[in-house]
């Protein structure tokens, strides 16, 4: 049995959940608050981060490691391209999400607007969020707009880990009340609507929205 440990609003937990759903792999989500996780959780995730993953063979931490492992053990449908350049580009877009989008979307916007008020009962830094929205988001959106072009996916003609890694970050941005302006970034907006409309994404987004609505009262 597969178990994913983590919080459902984490973009990295979501990345793993979407990949599992795309591969039609059943799993259990075990809730973990990374801010309060103790020594027992560190036996699963030595750095204390989410997600952690367990199946009948192994225990793993880090979303990219988990996704690569699941691909290797459950290769169909393939979410990592076979051709070398396409494979590298898919990994690049995954990293663009993890290392490029996440610190800004998450730390500077989502944390300030959602995490701080809802989970820490503290006022977030709205000045930081506004500055990030005005100054840091446009170049990130411009790059993706150019990379997507008229294509349905970032790499090749089918969904890859690159799409999952990028699109999962935009869910947190959406939870924070920010979406790309469809007039300025029409291709990115179209792309996100399509990817987020897939059953794998749609189910977790709806689950998260319901949870946030309840938390907000």
Image (tube, grey):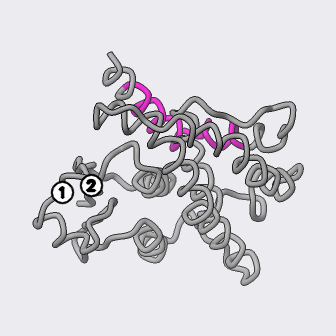
Relative image position of residue 32 (x, y in whole percent): 23, 51
Q: Is residue 172 left or right of residue 31?
A: right
Q: Residue furthest top?
A: 217
Quadrant of the image containing the C terminus: top left
Q: Residues within 10 Å of mark 2 (few under 14, many from 20)?
A: some
Local secondary structure at mark 2:
loop
Relative image position of residue 198 (x, y in whole percent): 59, 40
Local secondary structure at mark 1:
loop
Q: Which mark is residue 37?
A: 1
| Main secondary-structure element of the magenta-colored stretch | helix
Please identify the quarter of the rendering in which residue 178 is found. top right
Q: Which residues are magenta?
A: 192-210
Which residue lies under the disc numbered 2?
A: 34
Quadrant of the image containing the N terminus: bottom left
Asked if 93 appears above or below 23 in the picture, the reply is: below
Relative image position of residue 60 (x, y in whole percent): 30, 73
Q: Nearer the viewer, residue 110 or 190?
A: 110
The residue sitting at 21% across, 70% down in the picture is 44
Q: Is residue 13 magenta?
A: no
Q: Is residue 95 left or right of residue 205?
A: right
The residue sitting at 32% across, 47% down in the picture is 7
Q: Residues within 10 Å of mark 1 (few under 14, many from 20)?
A: some
The residue sitting at 40% across, 69% down in the picture is 66
Q: Are marks 2 and 1 in contact (CB under 8 Å)?
A: yes
Relative image position of residue 72 (x, y in whole percent): 46, 77
Q: Is residue 203 magenta?
A: yes
């Amino acid at each position: 049995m597969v178990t994913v440990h983590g919080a459902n609003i984490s973009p990295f937990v979501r990345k793993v959940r979407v990949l599992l759903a795309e591969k039609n792999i059943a799993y259990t989500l075990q809730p973990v608050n990374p801010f309060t996780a103790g020594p027992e959780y560190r036996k699963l995730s030595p750095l204390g981060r989410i997600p952690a993953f367990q199946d009948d063979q192994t225990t793993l931490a880090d979303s990219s490691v988990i996704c690569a492992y699941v691909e290797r053990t459950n290769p169909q449908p393939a979410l990592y391209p076979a051709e070398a350049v396409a494979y590298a580009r898919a990994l690049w877009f995954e990293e663009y999400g993890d290392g490029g989008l996440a610190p800004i979307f998450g730390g500077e916007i989502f944390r300030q607007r959602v995490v701080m008020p809802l989970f820490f009962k503290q006022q977030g830094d709205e000045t930081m969020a506004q500055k990030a929205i005005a100054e840091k988001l446009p170049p990130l959106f411009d790059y993706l707009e150019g990379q997507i072009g008229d294509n349905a996916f970032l790499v090749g003609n089918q969904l890859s880990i690159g799409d999952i890694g990028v699109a999962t970050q935009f869910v947190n941005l959406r939870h924070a009340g920010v979406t790309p302006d469809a007039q300025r970034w029409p291709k990115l907006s179209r792309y996100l609507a399509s990817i987020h409309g897939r059953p794998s994404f749609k189910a977790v987004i709806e689950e998260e929205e319901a949870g946030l609505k309840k938390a907000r009262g």
